Image (cartoon, helix red, strand yellow):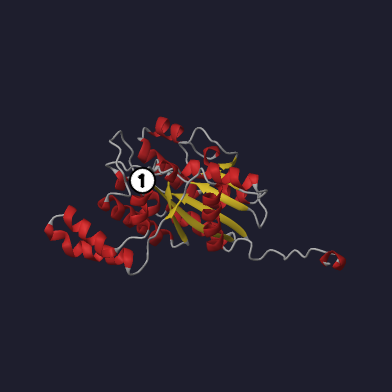
Amino acid sequence: MGYAQLVIGPAGSGKSTYCSSLYQHCETVGRTMHVVNLDPAAENFDYPVAMDIRELISLEDVMEELGLGPNGGLLYCMEHLEENLDDWLTEELDNYMDDDYLVFDCPGQIELFSHVPVLKNFVEHLQRKNFNVCAVYLLDSQKCCGLFLTGIVTDCPIYQFMTDITKFISGCMASLSAMVQLELPHINILSKMDLVTNKKDIEDFLNPEPQVLLSELNQRMAPQFSKLNKALIELVDEYNMVSFVPLDLRKESSIRYVLAQIDNCIQYGEDADVKIKDFDPEDDD
């Protein structure tokens, strides 16, 4: 059985940095991990690329030959990947052992994991190949662009994302949309915690009080949205559908904790043989 992480999240949320840090951590502790690039627009990598979608198709070629823009071109590339799951992807996966651990670094267009079925079909293909898969959703603790929910990144002011109640709720809903679409074990990571100056504000949202959230949301929204606000807060609180794990890449303990959460989701290592160490009874004296 193989194991895989599907690293998703809005553009600029730190997915590639997460993959690089995770690879370096595993290399340090003597653990094997392979990072796969699924972004046809990517150019530079801080990790060894085990598999690369650009060997199949690249965004630059699609934009040049078909005259598509960046978003349309990327969707075309991902749909081309979907059409080649049984050929290119299967051939690439055959190069790895049954117990290998793959980390898929995905593009940041949010429609890919909210309503377009490309990644859903990609995951199902991995599962047919006997991979246990976990979705790892990254959300930037530092900033959010004004066009966050479209997945488009433009030049815009920097906001404190998680200390703004409306952006916190929209982040939760985007994560929930990915959970519903992909139907996978799901870990939400609050990235770039090393850049947060006031961590107490963040902690208030990691362990939120529902009545406080509702009160703040009602203050920010028009009165006609009060029932909707109540329903959203109940969804976040009562059903415990969305929670976040903070990640500070400066701390090995933080990376280790996040990885342990993911490993638990995909049951990594549970089928490993127990190692019995020989010892000399006289050593006990």
> What residue did someone put label 1 on?
198
Give the residue furthest to the left: 223
Q: Nearer the viewer, residue 184 or 275?
A: 275
Q: Looking at the image, is 279 positioned above or below residue 139?
A: below
- Displayed quadrant of residue 62: top left
Quarter of the figure that contains the N terminus: bottom right
Q: Position of residue 235 (x, y in %)?
A: 30, 66
Residue at the spot 41% in from the left edge and 30% down from the top edge? 64
As drawn, the residue found furthest toward the top would be 64
Task: Identify the residue at image location x=50%, y=58%.
Answer: 134
Residue 115 visible from this viewpoint: no
- At x 39% / y 56%, what residue is drawn? 178
Q: Position of residue 266 (x, y in %)?
A: 55, 62
Q: Quick one: label 1, few (<14), some, or many (20+) residues within 10 Å?
A: few
Q: Is residue 240 visible?
A: yes
Quarter of the image with the C terminus is: bottom right
